[in-house]
Image: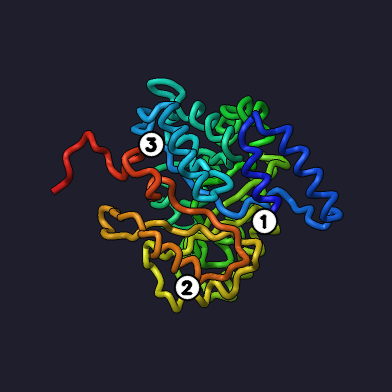
């Protein structure tokens, strides 16, 4: 707890001398026993889905928003993607790069690679379509990394790693053959990304037994990935009893993505922000050894009036 408190004070440039001195004192006082990895220190994150309408928020708006987020004791951020299909968030200016730069002054960041709008549809078609998608993705990933290479070098101390925004599911990869094909793709992808920490996420569909899913996540970790699992509380895709059975089979290195929303419509997808008491209750019912990521920034009460859930320039659908 002491290390985390000092870490928060280190977020500002003007406090670095104090931080270095305090960290030294803490190490001496505790005899080095409290030394932990960076990931152990970063216990609570928040994921942000970039949308072009957020460009209007501007630097002052983002600074204010991030100060509200820090007050919630959030340690790190995740940009879910840096490119969505052909959209690179460069208009009317490279606003996402500007936003990431503002973020890294306040907290370290995972950067999402690019994703494709047709990903879910292609995964649902089965192994043949999945392989075609994987091959195309591997051809594109180098360009995605290159686009942000300079940024990651300039801000290497605050760059936590790459997040692969392809949401896996036991429904898409229920068979051993499908998982073997996926693992081959992920191994190739990790090789291209090199030693940089890399994360990938999953959502539950109950297509695999809890014990089998727990073993699968270990296999993904053995491929060199940090594994993040959506808790499914917001979508209510599984019952609370089913969720508990799956959580019981997770190793503590799995990061839980806590859904900070309550789904109100499936087609089209609509949701409201979860109330603080709803979110706290959901988290309290889960194993407490996991690090966590809130999904998403847009649903937090601190962003109300700053990041909108819908495009406020368009009339509501009847």
N-terminal of the two: label 3 or label 2?
A: 3
The correct choice, above or below, for 307 with respect to 259 in the image is: above
N-terminal of the two: label 1 or label 3?
A: 1
Q: Which residue is mark 3?
A: 51
Q: Quadrant of residue 265?
A: bottom left
The correct choice, above or below, for 212 with respect to 45 in the image is: below
Q: Residue furthest left?
A: 318
SS for callout 2: helix
SS for callout 1: loop
Circle 1 residues within 10 Å: few <14, some 14–19, many ≥20: few
SS for callout 3: loop
Between the residue at mark 3 and the residue at mark 2, the CA separation in whole angstroms equals: 31 Å
Q: Nearer the viewer, residue 263 or 76?
A: 76
Between the residue at mark 2 and the residue at mark 1, the CA separation in whole angstroms equals: 29 Å
Rendered image: mark on residue 243: 2
Q: Residue furthest top?
A: 93
Rendered image: mark on residue 285: none
Which quadrant does the N terminus fall into? bottom right
Q: Nearer the viewer, residue 254 or 5?
A: 5
Rendered image: mark on residue 1: 1
In the image, residue 19 lies at what x, y percent?
A: 72, 38
In the image, residue 204 lies at what x, y percent?
A: 47, 65
């Amino acid at each position: 707890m002491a290390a985390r408190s000092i870490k928060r004070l280190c977020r500002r440039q003007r406090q670095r001398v104090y931080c270095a001195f305090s960290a030294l004192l803490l190490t001496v006082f505790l005899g080095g026993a409290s030394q932990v990895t960076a990931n152990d220190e970063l216990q609570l994150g928040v994921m942000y889905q970039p949308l072009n309408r957020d460009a209007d928020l501007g630097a002052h708006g983002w600074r204010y928003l991030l100060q509200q987020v820090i007050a919630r004791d959030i340690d790190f951020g995740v940009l879910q993607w840096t490119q969505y299909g052909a959209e690179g968030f460069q208009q009317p200016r490279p606003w996402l790069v500007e936003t990431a730069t503002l973020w890294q002054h306040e907290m370290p960041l995972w950067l999402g690679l690019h994703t494709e709008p047709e990903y879910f549809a292609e995964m649902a078609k089965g192994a043949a379509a999945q392989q075609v998608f994987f091959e195309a993705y591997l051809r594109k990933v180098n360009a995605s990394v290159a686009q942000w290479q300079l940024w990651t070098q300039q801000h290497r101390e605050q760059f936590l790693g790459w997040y692969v925004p392809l949401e896996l599911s036991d429904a898409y990869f229920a068979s051993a053959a499908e998982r073997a094909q996926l693992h081959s793709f992920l191994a190739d992808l990790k090789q291209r990304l090199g030693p940089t920490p890399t994360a990938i996420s999953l959502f539950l569909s109950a297509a695999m037994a809890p014990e089998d899913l727990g073993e699968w996540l270990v296999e993904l970790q053995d491929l060199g990935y940090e594994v993040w699992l959506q808790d499914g509380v917001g979508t209510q895709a599984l019952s609370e009893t089913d969720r508990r059975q799956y959580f019981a089979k997770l190793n503590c290195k799995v990061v839980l993505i806590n859904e900070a929303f309550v789904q109100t419509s499936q087609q089209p997808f609509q949701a409201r922000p979860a109330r603080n008491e709803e979110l706290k209750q959901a988290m309290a019912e889960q194993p407490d050894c996991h690090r966590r990521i809130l999904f998403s920034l847009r649903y937090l009460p601190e962003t109300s009036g700053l990041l909108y859930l819908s495009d406020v320039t368009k009339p509501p659908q009847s």
